[in-house]
Image (spheres, coloured by chain):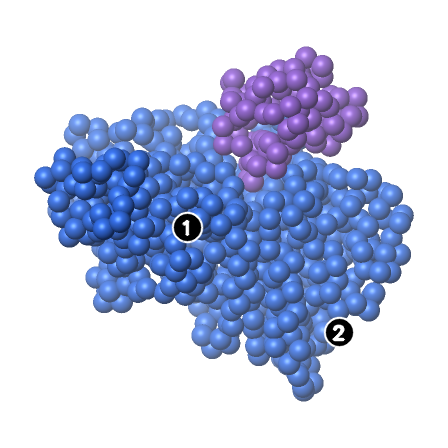
Chain colours: A purple, B blue
């Protein structure tokens, strides 16, 4: 099952858990399933049905350029990282 | 992985396995550049072109009460005047243009201020007139009534509860979570690994210090310039010198609320960018003025406008805390990084946080980043955005730790270096990297052990990291019937990328570098290509060129099979020849001459968005002499070591290393915006803002380390940015060892050095 590494500032949504294993074949499914367990995650990561432009997602240490369509493997590591610049 | 394992046609048995890669041909644009025939943005001359000038705010922070253009409109030479009222209202819309995320709502307000001006130099109106003089006169006739407001230019002051607020609607967000708090802090984020408290508890030695860097400008020699023609059919053409024609198209279309297909951007030669020519300033203004006047309009900024009205690197405040065992092994690393984003959110603080400890294997780490708006020009990318500021702090802390522990500063870094498999504090794991190899190469370099005698002289070192970028790129290769090829690409050539990209195509096609003719095309002539920035171009556009060349070979093999009367599967390409068996072959050149009679022209193409970006590391050694009476620092010797993965054209890799080092010397010793208490920049000319000259720097020695990047067919890593990362810290470390005083504020000017030595009292608090 893919493992999502939860950033420090999202651990209020995971009961303090730093890593959560969730099912999913791609990032969209992973975030949906994570949100089902930890409500509020999707709201922070997704805007208008797309990955927030202020967040980069690294799958297996490679920053994805496929957004929510990025496939993940059963043993994948997923990291949410603030975009290089950003803010609003 | 070797080249052969990747089954790259045409790459066998040559020097280092390559025929072209690693050689030093003369650049394709060399003659035009050295004879003055290269055409830059300001060289564009269209019939009837008007001169555009921009009126800028005299206040660092003020509400715009009224703009009256009546008197300017009566000027007989004035053909158009625009203000923010001519811009459509833009809602939040983000795009990543290759070296940072842009919110076009803020971009629009930065192009022409609407209700408030947020820095001195903020554009408020623009005029197009039949002469430059008339345009200058006309902007003086525009009456703007301001309500001045208190200004804040310092990042720490801007975070104070009683600070003036720039954006009344700005709510601090924390990884997408609004905090509900109105402040100048746009974003706060945190990276964490391990247990930071336990890490410091386990440490035998802890060092802690605060550091600052001032705003620094990219200092490109060519000011921004754009010529726009808004045609009667609402098709717009823009000639501009920018780091990415497609980025200009996207930004201008977004600011003007137009489809990208309405705009064609023609990239001109560019006189430097270093990250500062990604955002648009003149382009939307020139387009609006052209629409109103019906004529082409050129807007060219003055040097003073470049300093005050475009985006420099952000000022920083950084606090570093390191813990280590007596052995030197790091146990904990903590950073608090605050960047002055300027007038609108979006500094490089995210990148700084990713860079600050990236070079080291830190078991317990915590990094907090704050993106803070200030009444200064909106900051933009500058060569390894955020990393020089982070390294100025972290690499001095490493030096301090080495001294306390009595360990050689390079040995301490070697002991703690990140390697393949090291997990970074923000989470991902490094693939194959060359951090260790750079440090060892520096340690083994004769410079490091060369005697350095004389008073007030010392040696310093520092190490640096940059992510490098990937992004989208496109190339088209057409085969000529004389056996050469034309290569069309979308990457602006700033640092020799025509050569480095053409050479990669030439390698695949077994052609000489000179037989591939590169052309940087406009946005209607080639597929989408991201900016030349993020050290991505030789990597990503290089892969596009390789794939386009492979596409050429696939088609040429079909022609060869036809000509040789052979099965396609039996045709192989090696050493410039298509071979279908013993004594059965045809050269690339001969086959190229027969294309017309074997099915017509052959054109290869590729559009890519590659992963597999290889990170870059560099280690610098510097010798300095400090004059204790004047505070002047003389650089005596400088050596830059860097992992290039694979140097496609070693001369241009060395040029990047030297250029980055020189710019870093500018950060270290000379460059910085100075403001008065009203937020007015005091040094907005090249007379007062000192850039390093040939008299200030020695020859920069270079050592190219090659730890091939497995994510590129030839092993390429981006090389343009990381060499600006170590210099300021290396020089600070050398100064400390020369005079026994640690300089924590860059630039380390003579005045600051004398203040730190206690010779001078601080000029102001």
Name which residue lies at 25% across and 35% down.
B567
Q: Residue at x 71, y 60 (%)?
A: B413
Residue at image position (30%, 65%) is B26
Ranked by sequence position, the earlier of labels 1 and 2 is 1
The x and y percentages for residue B470 are 47, 42
Image location (x, y in percent) of residue B650: 43, 63
SS at badge 1: helix
Q: Position of residue B752 (x, y in %)?
A: 65, 68
Extreme-left residue of the structure: B597
Drawn side of residue B161 relative to residue B19, left or right: right
Q: Quadrant of residue B755?
A: bottom right
Residue B216 visible, this angle = no
Give the crowd class for mark 2: few <14, some 14-19, many >=20 residues within 10 Å. few
**Picture quarter with the C terminus of chain B:** bottom right
Q: Position of residue A30 (x, y in %)?
A: 62, 19
In the image shown, does B595 or B674 lie closer to the viewer?
B595
Q: State the SS at label 2.
A: loop
Rendered residue at 61%/34% (across/down): A60
Instruction: Indicate left or right for B581 with B145 as reference.
Output: left
The disc at residue B538 is 1
Q: Tag on residue B739?
A: none
Q: Nearer the viewer, mark 1 or mark 2?
A: 1
Residue designated by label 2: B740
Q: Are marks 1 and 2 on the same chain?
A: yes
């Amino acid at each position: 099952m893919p493992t999502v590494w939860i950033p420090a500032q999202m651990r209020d949504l995971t009961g303090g858990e730093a890593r959560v294993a969730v099912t999913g074949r791609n990032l969209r499914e992973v975030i949906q399933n994570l949100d089902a367990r930890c409500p509020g995650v999707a709201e922070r990561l997704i805007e208008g049905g797309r990955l927030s432009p202020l967040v980069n997602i690294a799958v297996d240490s490679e920053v994805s350029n496929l957004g929510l369509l990025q496939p993940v493997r059963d043993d994948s590591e997923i990291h949410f990282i603030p975009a290089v610049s950003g803010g609003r | 992985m070797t080249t052969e394992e990747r089954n790259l046609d045409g790459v066998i048995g040559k020097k280092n396995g390559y025929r072209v890669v690693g050689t030093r041909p003369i650049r394709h644009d060399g003659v035009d550049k050295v004879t003055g025939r290269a055409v830059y943005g300001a060289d564009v001359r269209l019939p009837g072109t008007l001169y555009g000038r921009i009126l800028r705010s005299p206040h660092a922070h003020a509400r715009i009460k009224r703009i009256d253009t009546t008197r300017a409109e009566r000027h007989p030479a004035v053909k158009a005047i625009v203000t923010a009222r001519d811009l459509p209202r833009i809602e939040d819309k983000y795009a990543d243009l290759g070296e940072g995320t842009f919110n076009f709502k803020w971009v629009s307000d930065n192009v022409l201020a609407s209700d408030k001006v947020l820095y001195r130099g903020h554009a408020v109106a623009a005029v197009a007139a039949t002469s430059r003089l008339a345009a200058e006169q006309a902007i003086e006739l525009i009456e703007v009534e301001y309500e001045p407001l208190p200004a804040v230019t310092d990042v720490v002051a801007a975070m104070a509860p009683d600070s003036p607020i720039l954006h009344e609607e700005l709510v601090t967000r924390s990884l997408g979570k609004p905090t509900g708090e109105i402040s100048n802090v746009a974003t706060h984020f945190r990276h964490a690994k391990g247990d930071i408290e336990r890490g410091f508890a386990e440490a035998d030695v802890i060092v802690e210090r605060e550091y600052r860097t001032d705003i620094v400008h990219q200092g490109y020699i060519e000011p921004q310039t754009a010529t726009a023609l808004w045609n009667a059919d609402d098709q717009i053409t823009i000639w501009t010198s920018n780091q990415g024609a497609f980025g200009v198209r996207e930004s201008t279309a977004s600011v003007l609320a137009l489809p990208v297909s309405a705009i064609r951007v023609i990239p001109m030669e560019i006189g430097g960018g270093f990250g500062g020519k990604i955002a648009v300033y003149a382009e939307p203004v020139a387009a609006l003025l052209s629409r109103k006047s019906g004529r082409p309009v050129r807007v060219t900024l003055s040097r003073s406008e470049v300093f005050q009205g475009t985006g420099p690197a952000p000022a920083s405040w950084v606090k570093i805390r390191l813990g280590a065992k007596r052995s030197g092994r790091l146990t904990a690393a903590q950073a608090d990084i605050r960047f002055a984003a300027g007038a609108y959110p979006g500094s490089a603080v995210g990148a700084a946080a990713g860079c600050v400890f990236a070079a080291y294997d830190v078991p317990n780490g915590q990094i907090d980043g704050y993106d803070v708006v200030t009444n200064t020009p909106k900051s933009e990318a500058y060569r390894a955005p955020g990393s020089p500021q982070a390294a100025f702090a972290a690499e001095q802390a490493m030096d301090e730790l080495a001294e306390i522990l009595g360990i050689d500063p390079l040995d301490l870094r070697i002991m703690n270096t990140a390697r393949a498999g090291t997990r970074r504090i923000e989470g991902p794991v490094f693939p194959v990297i060359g951090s260790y190899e750079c440090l060892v190469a520096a340690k083994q370099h004769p410079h490091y052990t060369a005697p350095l005698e004389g008073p007030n002289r010392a040696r310093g070192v520092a190490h640096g990291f940059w992510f490098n970028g990937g992004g989208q790129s496109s190339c088209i290769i057409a085969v000529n019937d004389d056996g050469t090829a034309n290569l069309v690409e979308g990457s602006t050539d700033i640092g020799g990328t025509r050569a480095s990209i053409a050479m990669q195509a030439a390698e695949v096609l077994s052609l000489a570098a000179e037989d591939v003719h590169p052309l940087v095309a406009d946005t209607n002539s080639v597929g989408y290509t991201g900016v030349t920035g993020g050290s991505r171009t030789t990597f990503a556009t290089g892969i596009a060129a390789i794939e386009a060349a492979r596409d050429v070979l696939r088609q040429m093999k079909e022609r060869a099979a036809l000509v040789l009367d052979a099965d396609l599967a039996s045709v192989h390409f090696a050493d410039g020849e298509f071979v279908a068996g013993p004594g059965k072959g045809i050269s690339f050149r001969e086959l190229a001459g027969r294309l017309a009679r074997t099915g017509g022209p052959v054109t290869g193409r590729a559009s890519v968005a590659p992963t597999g970006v290889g990170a870059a590391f560099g280690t610098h050694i510097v010798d300095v002499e400090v004059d204790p009476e004047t505070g002047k620092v003389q650089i005596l010797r400088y050596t830059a070591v860097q992992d290039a993965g694979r140097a496609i054209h070693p001369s241009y890799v060395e040029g990047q290393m030297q250029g980055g080092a020189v710019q870093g010397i500018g950060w270290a010793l000379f460059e910085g915006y100075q403001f008065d208490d009203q937020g007015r920049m005091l040094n907005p000319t090249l007379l007062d803002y000192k850039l390093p000259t040939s008299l200030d720097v020695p020859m920069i020695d270079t050592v190219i380390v090659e730890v091939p990047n497995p994510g590129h067919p030839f092993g390429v890593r981006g090389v343009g940015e990381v060499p600006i990362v170590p210099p300021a810290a290396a020089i600070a470390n050398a100064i400390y060892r020369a005079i026994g005083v640690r300089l924590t504020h860059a630039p380390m000017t003579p005045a600051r050095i004398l203040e730190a030595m206690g010779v001078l009292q601080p000029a102001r608090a």
